[in-house]
Image (cartoon, rainbow, N blue to C red):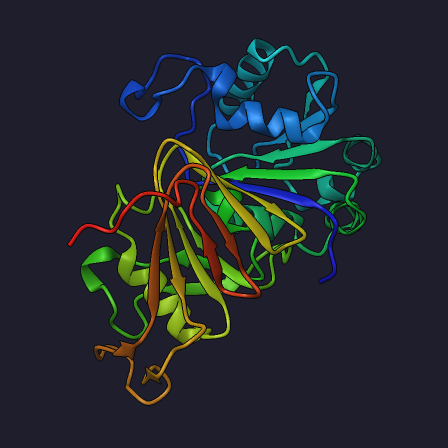
C-alpha cells in the first residue's frame, strides 16, 4: 500500500484528562498523545469523528473523548455510533467520515470493528482518505490492533509461545507490514505477539504499552509518543522458525528474532528495519 496517510495506534489507557489511572499519565493532557492526534490532524479546528464501535459502553466512551478533545480546544467533534453493520453503509456516517480530518477508534473488542465496518462503504472511504493523506486514523487498544492487515483477536499469556494459543483474523488493512498488540507490558502479551510473528515472519510485531503510541507516516516511518515503551519484534534476520512444522499445542522456537525496546522520541523504519534512538549520546552500560 503506497499511502500518504498518518496512523496513530495507541496501547490503551491514554491520558484523557479525567483523573483516572494517574500513574500512567505523567504528562498534562496538553502534552498527551491525544494532543499529538489533534496536532497531526491540523489543530483544534479539525473535524474529528470518534467511532466507539469496539466498546460495550459506547455512549460513555464517546462522552469521555468528547470531554478530552474539548479540553484540547476542539470544537468540531462528532460520534459515528456504529452498532450495526448497516450503519457503516449509511449516508450520515459516510459523509461524516468523508469530511473528517481525523477518525478515532476506541478500545474494546477489535472483532466488533471488523465485523461491523470491514468491507463496507465507510471502510472504503477511510482507505481512500488514508491513501491520499487527507485523514489521520487514530485508535486505542482494539482501535490500534485493528489497523493491521493481520490482526490478533485473542490469546492467553499462560499459554505463551505454544502453537495455536494466539487467534488471528483479518484487520482493516491500513498497516500491511506489521502486527500490533496493545496493553503489552501490563498484560504480559510477549508470547502471543511472538507467535503472531512466527505465523507471519514477513511482518514486524509491535507491542504497545499503555499510554504509549506511535505516529506512523506512509505506513513506514514510526515515531514513539507517550510515557511508556514500545517493544518491536523484528524478524528481518530470522534464522530459525519451526511454527509450520510443530503440531498445535506444542512449544515453538525462533532464533535471531531481534527485539528493540523504544521510548519517547525513538524512531523505527519498518521497511529498512532500522532504529534511530532519540538520545544517541547515551552510552551502553557494560
Give coordinates of residue 260: x percent, y percent: 35, 56
Q: Which residue is drawn at 27% across and 62% down?
A: 191
Q: Is residue 256 visible?
A: yes
Toward the bottom, the furthest residue is 245
Residue 9 appears at what percent x and percent y? Answer: 52, 42
Residue 220: x and y in percent read 60, 56
Residue ID at (59%, 38%):
138
Q: Quadrant of residue 241?
A: bottom left
Q: Against 71, is 5 above or below?
A: below
Residue at 25%, 78% (x, y): give it.
252
Which residue occupies the foreground of this view, 191 or 32?
A: 32
Q: Quadrant of the C terminus?
A: bottom left
Identify whether 54 is placed above or below 26: below
Q: In this view, does 78 lie to the left or right of 215?
A: right
At 66% from the left and 14% from the top, the residue drawn is 74
**Would you say 71 lies left or right of 259 here?**
right
Q: Can residue 80 be seen in this view?
A: no
Determine whether 35 is above or below 126 in the image.
Answer: above
The N terminus is located in which quarter? bottom right
The quarter of the picture where residue 82 lies is top right
Q: Is residue 271 above or below residue 19?
A: below
Labels in figure, total: 0
Find residue 199 and report its horizontal and vertical position in percent: 42, 75
Image quadrant where residue 86 sits? top right
Name the outermost residue toward the left.
Answer: 286
Amino acid at each position: 500500500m503506497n499511502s500518504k496517510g498518518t496512523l496513530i495506534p495507541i496501547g490503551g489507557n491514554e491520558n484523557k484528562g479525567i483523573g483516572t489511572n494517574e500513574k500512567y499519565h505523567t504528562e498534562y493532557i496538553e502534552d498527551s498523545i491525544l494532543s499529538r492526534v489533534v496536532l497531526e490532524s491540523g489543530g483544534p479546528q479539525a473535524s474529528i469523528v470518534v467511532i466507539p464501535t469496539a466498546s460495550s459502553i459506547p455512549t460513555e466512551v464517546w462522552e469521555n473523548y468528547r470531554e478530552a478533545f474539548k479540553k484540547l480546544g476542539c470544537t468540531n467533534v462528532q460520534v459515528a455510533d456504529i452498532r450495526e453493520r448497516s450503519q457503516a453503509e449509511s449516508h450520515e456516517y459516510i459523509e461524516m467520515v468523508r469530511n473528517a480530518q481525523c477518525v478515532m477508534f476506541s478500545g474494546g473488542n477489535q472483532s466488533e470493528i471488523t465485523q461491523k465496518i470491514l468491507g463496507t462503504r465507510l471502510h472504503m472511504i477511510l482507505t481512500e482518505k488514508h491513501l491520499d493523506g487527507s485523514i489521520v486514523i487514530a485508535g486505542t487498544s482494539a482501535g490500534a490492533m485493528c489497523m493491521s492487515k493481520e490482526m490478533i483477536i485473542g490469546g492467553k499469556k499462560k499459554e505463551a509461545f505454544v502453537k495455536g494459543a494466539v487467534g488471528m483474523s483479518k484487520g482493516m488493512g491500513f498497516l500491511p507490514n506489521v502486527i500490533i498488540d496493545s496493553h503489552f507490558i501490563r498484560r504480559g502479551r510477549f508470547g502471543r505477539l511472538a507467535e503472531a510473528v512466527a505465523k507471519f515472519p514477513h511482518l514486524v510485531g509491535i507491542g504497545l504499552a499503555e499510554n504509549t503510541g506511535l505516529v506512523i507516516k506512509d505506513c513506514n516511518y514510526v515515531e514513539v509518543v507517550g510515557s511508556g515503551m514500545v517493544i518491536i519484534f523484528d524478524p528481518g534476520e530470522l534464522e530459525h522458525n519451526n511454527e509450520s512444522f510443530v503440531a498445535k499445542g506444542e512449544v515453538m522456537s525462533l532464533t535471531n528474532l531481534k527485539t528493540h525496546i523504544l521510548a519517547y522520541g525513538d524512531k523505527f523504519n519498518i521497511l529498512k528495519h532500522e532504529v534511530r534512538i532519540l538520545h544517541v549520546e547515551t552510552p551502553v552500560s557494560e
